[in-house]
Image (cartoon, rainbow, N blue to C red):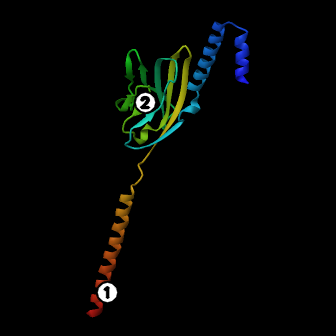
Amino acid sequence: MCTAHFNEFCDRCTMERCQLFAFSLLAFITIADSSDPNSFKKSVTGYRGEDITLDCKLLTGHLIQVDWHWTSGNNNVKTKIALNDPQIGPIFYDSPLKEKLVFSDDSSLTIKNVEMNDTGTYTCVMTTFPSGSFERDITLTVLDPPQSSGVIIRIVISVLLLIITMTTITYVFIARKRTT
């Protein structure tokens, strides 16, 4: 159906107009897809001590710069934490995160060795040409690392050994008391 309308349109116009229409349609579809916040993770969960990457990728177009902002989970103050400009390189602003931030090639942001107080909302603002700016929020939740099964097994064995030891001591104590 769509192809029939496209072919009918192209039959009525010059080849240049047809190519321009096809290119414009393709550009619109690509730009609409690249700005769709549903195509990226809206929330990320990580464990204390891990490196966490927050994705912010431009699928098409010319990237002018990427700004990153952070709203701490403790307050509602939005802090500008980083800027990546292909012409001048990355800039990391004074913030509690400054020494922990690294940009990847696609302007995604990695936070090294996350801590509980890194929890919050991170906003990526991509400025492109000719499409303008696109903004998206990513909520980062940082959790304590889960206990490994080895630690849990050691705790259970220690408790069992303690119970056995206490039972043995109690038995020996009672047995001695009966013999005297």
Q: Nearer the viewer, residue 107 or 70?
A: 107
Q: What residue type is disc 1 on?
A: Ile
Q: What residue type is disc 2 on?
A: Leu
Q: First in sequence: mark 2 or mark 1?
A: 2
Marker count (numbered): 2
Q: Which residue is mark 2?
A: 109
Q: Going by the image, does 173 lie left or right of 96?
A: left
Give the residue at the far bottom of this rendering: 179
Q: Give x and y (percent) for residue 52.
A: 42, 37
Q: Which residue is mark 1?
A: 174
Residue depicted at x 66% and y 11%: 18
146 vs 75: above or below: below
- Whether label 2 touches label 1, CB < 8 Å: no
142 vs 96: above or below: below
Q: Quadrant of the C terminus?
A: bottom left
Q: Give x and y (percent) for residue 59.
A: 51, 24
Q: Going by the image, does 147 lie left or right of 123?
A: left
Residue depicted at x 29% and y 88%: 175
Q: Give the distance between the C-alpha atoms of the residues marked 2 and 1, in whole angstroms.
A: 66 Å
Q: Quadrant of the N terminus?
A: top right
Q: Going by the image, does 141 lie left or right of 7?
A: left
Q: Give x and y (percent) for residue 98.
A: 37, 29
Q: Give x and y (percent) for residue 30.
A: 58, 22
Crowd band around label 2 with a 10 angstrom C-alpha radius: few (<14), some (14–19), many (20+): many
